[in-house]
Image (spheres, rainbow, N blue to C red):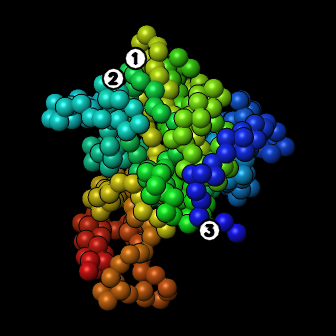
Amino acid sequence: MQAYLSPDDCNLEEFTQQVTRSLTPQEVPQAHDIQNNIPIYDVTQLDLTGDTRALKAEWAHVFLKSSGVLLLKNAFQDTGCIDAASVIYERIIADEKAAQGAKADHFAASGANDRIWNSAQKLCHYDPKVFAQYFGNLAIDAACEAWLGPNYQMTAQVNLVRPSGAAQSPHRDYHLGFQPREVAARYPAHVHDLSPVLTLQGAVAHVDMPIESGPTKLLPFSQLYRHGYLAFTMPEFRDFFEENFVQVPLKKGDVLFFNPALYHAGGANVSADIQRMANLLQVSSAYGRSLENLDRQSMTLQLYEVLARGDHGLSEPQVDAAISACAEGYSFPTNLDTDPPIGGLAPETPAALCRRALANQMAVQDFNAALTALYRRKQA
């Protein structure tokens, strides 16, 4: 058994054999189309309100053992919340530029590209009702649970690539994908296997993205290569990617999800006038460390105020999805001296408190006090 992986063992021929295959309809029986080895699911044709375990199992198989990427068409059937969020994000970009100047975009040169780090928290603070309608999305919730299970941690970063915006270099993502090769090589081989199941990558299309606008370049099946975290910076692997990547056009309201170990890169925007805006979802397992720190306490209070009013237009499952994207859903870490498990193995979570408060029609002031007390008990 190989305990450690070495850059010396990276083999382009072996990599080529793993990625040179075709996705068959039999592997994705619930998909409505396959383009460039990417299964496409039309959310308008899916029942996401009933038992979704078979669908989630299919998506998990795609991420783990198949093409590694899937496209959810019409994930936002009403794109009004996307338009509202886009207006807010444009304002945030302008405000942050005025205060801080242009921001660097990791993996690509700054300039035509604009970033909003921690766009989830900023959207919630700016307009919690838009946040609720945006993240109260059953398709996004189902994809996150398919790969990460419940209590996932939602983070997001807006990427706006204007005409002439440069492409990214091909890469893998967080965790090991953000480590230098020599550091990644110090982790045991089984950690290379573990890293991809700790996060899920997503991209919400805020505008129509034809190929010339540079939608994400993808190499299906590349997440299967075990040495991939050590190989993606090697010139021969990058050359192979550039010669073999695929892209699919996106419509506003589509959402692309993929295994973080999939070789991918944002494309160059060679269009004349398309402002390519995507909200990049970096979703973490409850058992891992998320990429960004979010003030989930203040976010949860603001979201509760909106949900308690009842004027959000969301169904009960959509409310549950919005809470999942906002509130902390895992009990740990905590201070077991002051926050001991009572009547079970784990203390109540902020997400569970939020759901209980809504069910009991708890007043906002009382919820704020209860949430504050819960977070205080967790402190060392």
Residue at the extreme top of the image, as rendered: 272
The quarter of the picture where residue 193 lies is bottom right
The residue lying at 59 percent from left, 24 percent from top is 249
Q: Position of residue 89 (x, y in %)?
A: 32, 34
Q: Secondary structure at mark 1?
A: loop
* Residue topped by disc 1: 164
**Which residue type does callout 2 highlight?**
Ala
Mark 3: amino acid: Ala
Of the numbered discs 1 and 2, the one sitting upstream in the chain is: 2
Q: CA distance from mark 2 to mark 3?
A: 44 Å
Q: Quadrant of the N terminus?
A: bottom right
The percent coordinates of residue 55 (x first, y second) are 71, 51
Disc sitting over residue 112 in the figure: 2
Is residue 281 positioned above or below 238 on the image?
below
Quadrant in which residue 206 is drawn: top left
Q: Is residue 151 visible?
A: no
Relative depth, front residue between 227 and 345: 227
Say what amino acid the circle numbered 1 marks. Ser
Q: Residue at x 41, y 24 (%)?
A: 166
In the displayed structure, 172 sits above or below 51; it is: above
| Res. 57 in view | yes
Helix, strand or loop under label 3: loop
Q: Residue at x 43, y 17 (%)?
A: 274
Q: Which residue is mark 3?
A: 3
CB within 8 Å, label 1 to label 2: yes
